[in-house]
Image (spheres, helix red, strand yellow):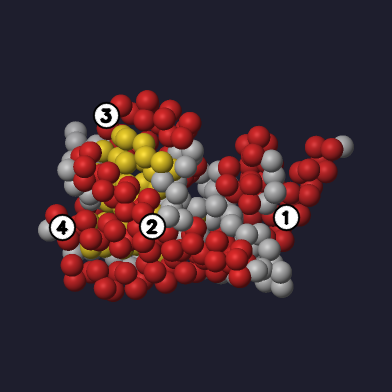
Amino acid sequence: MAGRLEGKVAVITGAASGIGRATADLFVAEGARVIAADIDDERGAELEGVHGDRLRYRHVDVTSEAAIAAAVDAAAAEYGRLDIMFNNAGAPGDPAPVLELTAEGFDRTLALLARSALLGTRFAAQQFQKQESAGAIINTASSAGLQGGWSTAGYTIGKHAVIGATRQSAAELGPLGIRVNAIAPGIIRTPIMARSFGVPLERAEEFAEFLNARHGRLQPIGRLGLPSDIAEAALWLGSDASTFVTGIVLPVDGGATSVYAGAATTDVFDAVQAFLSQSEG
């Protein structure tokens, strides 16, 4: 039986680890050919080795306009077309609170999170027009883009901007047959999640287990999210199963933003301190 993305070509940014890696693996398994864009060349090469001619890795820094354009061009050059653009790359950005956030730190964070998604949307849409075909664009937003208190100031504002870019792009590009949607992950067990709260990368998985035991039960689903949870949402939004869906922001957070009444950032920072203190003890 044909996969749900049989014959489609996708560009996935931030594809070497976490949500991007899970999505790249799933897209290939479902029949797509993928340009995996990232700055982690070692993991990117490993990913290419796993998937052979179904996936090509390209070094792409999404703070560079030219690099994003090159990733889209690579899809057309390598596989002849583009059908899905997943603007997923991200990082915590400047961790400073509002009282300390500088213009430089803010601009750097916005460039990484929001400008990259907007430029990815622009270049993908231009490629769709060149092909005279419809296409799907997916942006990674966050629960921090839906509510305050889930992350740091720069990240929260940046993810709100991703949602704004998604909605405006859906309005402008819909008449061209181009769908634009966003996924808003909750707390997902990825290295970036641990790093954003100051946990050493080599202890990311250990911290994820600790946080899941401490806070997973507070979510309606009863656990933290996995990269595969987001990958499945991206698969649906990129497939022909969602051809009448555009302009949505899909929370994939175990129900947390529907019911959560606390301050998530404070709670997780408390967990970080408990984790590190336990380790020192």
Relative to 91, residue 207 above or below: above
Name the side, left or right, on which 211 lies relative to 174.
right
* 4 and 2 marks in contact (CB < 8 Å): no
For the residue pair 271 and 222, the one nearer the viewer reads as: 271
Which numbered mark, 1 or 4, is in the foreground of this view? Answer: 4
* 1 and 3 marks in contact (CB < 8 Å): no
The answer to whether any part of residue 60 appears in the image is yes
Residue 48: % across, % down:
36, 30
Per the image, the residue denoted by label 3 is 53
Callout 2 crowding tier (Cα within 10 Å): few <14, some 14–19, many ≥20: some
Mark with earlier residue (1, 4)? 4
Which amino acid, mark 4? Lys
Residue 69: % across, % down:
32, 53
Which numbered mark, 2 or 3, is in the foreground of this view? Answer: 2
Mark with earlier residue (4, 2)? 2
Which amino acid, mark 1? Phe
Look at the numbered disc 4 and give the secondary structure of its residue: helix
Q: Which residue is located at x 46 percent, y 63 percent?
A: 114
Look at the numbered disc 1 and give the secondary structure of its residue: helix
Look at the numbered disc 2 and give the secondary structure of its residue: helix
Per the model, the C-alpha gap separating discs 2 and 1 is 34 Å
Residue 152: % across, % down:
64, 63
Per the image, the residue denoted by label 1 is 269
Per the image, the residue denoted by label 2 is 65
The answer to whether any part of residue 231 appears in the image is no
Mark with earlier residue (2, 1)? 2
Which numbered mark, 2 or 1, is in the foreground of this view? Answer: 2
Residue 130's tag is 4
Q: On the rendered image, what quadrant is the C terminus found in?
A: top right
The image quadrant of residue 166 is bottom left
Q: Which residue is located at x 41 percent, y 30 percent?
A: 45
Which numbered mark, 4 or 3, is in the foreground of this view? Answer: 4
